Image (tube, rainbow, N blue to C red):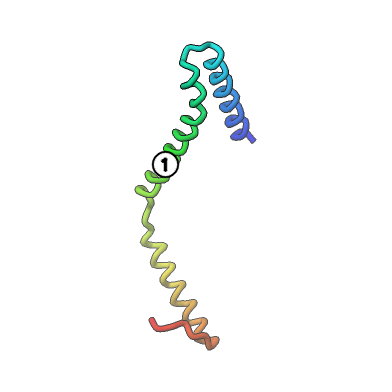
Amino acid sequence: MKHIVKIMSFLVLMSAVWVGLLQASIVPQSYTWLLPLYSIVSLGCYGLLMVGVGLMQFPTCPQESLLLQKDIIEAKEFLKQRGVDVGSD
């Protein structure tokens, strides 16, 4: 619940700044109308950057890999006992 309050308050703040810029005419109105589009594009770029950083720092887990291979071997043996063809090793 706290996270949604933060998001909503941020949106209200950004809307207030945007309307203030529209009415104050500090920035040319043609630029001010594009600010929501710029913020959406910036948010998308930030999201892509975070995904890329997360993929670059993706941890490898050699212990988990060994446990997974062991589980696969056990599952193949179990299925072979039940008469299911699981292919060659």
Quarter where residue 8 is shown: top right
Question: From what the image shows, is residue 47 above or below residue 5?
Answer: below
Q: Residue furthest front?
A: 30
User: In terms of depth relative to the viewer, which is nearer, 60 or 17?
Assistant: 17
Which residue is painted at 38% across and 81% down in the image? 89
Question: From what the image shows, is residue 30 above or below residue 43?
Answer: above
Q: On the rendered image, what quadrant is the N terminus found in?
A: top right
What amino acid does circle 1 point to?
Met
Quarter where residue 14 is shown: top right
Question: From what the image shows, is residue 26 above or below residue 9?
Answer: above
> In the figure, is residue 53 to the left or right of 31?
left
Instruction: Point out residue 87 in the picture as x, y percentages from the top left corner.
Output: 43, 83
Instruction: Point out residue 41 in the picture as x, y percentages from the top left corner.
Output: 46, 35
Which residue is painted at 42% across and 38% down in the image? 45
Count all numbered tags in the image, as a single digit: 1
Q: Residue furthest bottom?
A: 83
Q: Secondary structure at mark 1?
A: helix
Category of crowding for the residue at label 1, using alpha-carbon neighbours closer than 10 angstroms: few (below 14), some (14–19), many (at least 20): few
Question: From what the image shows, is residue 75 above or below residue 22?
Answer: below
Which residue is painted at 43% across and 72% down in the image? 70
Which residue is painted at 35% across and 48% down in the image? 56
Instruction: Point out residue 84 in the picture as x, y percentages from the top left corner.
Output: 52, 85
Instruction: Point out residue 22 in the picture as x, y percentages from the top left corner.
Output: 54, 17
User: In terms of depth relative to the viewer, which is nearer, 54 or 14?
Assistant: 14
Query: What residue did someone put label 1 on?
Result: 50
User: In terms of depth relative to the viewer, which is nearer, 35 or 79?
Assistant: 35
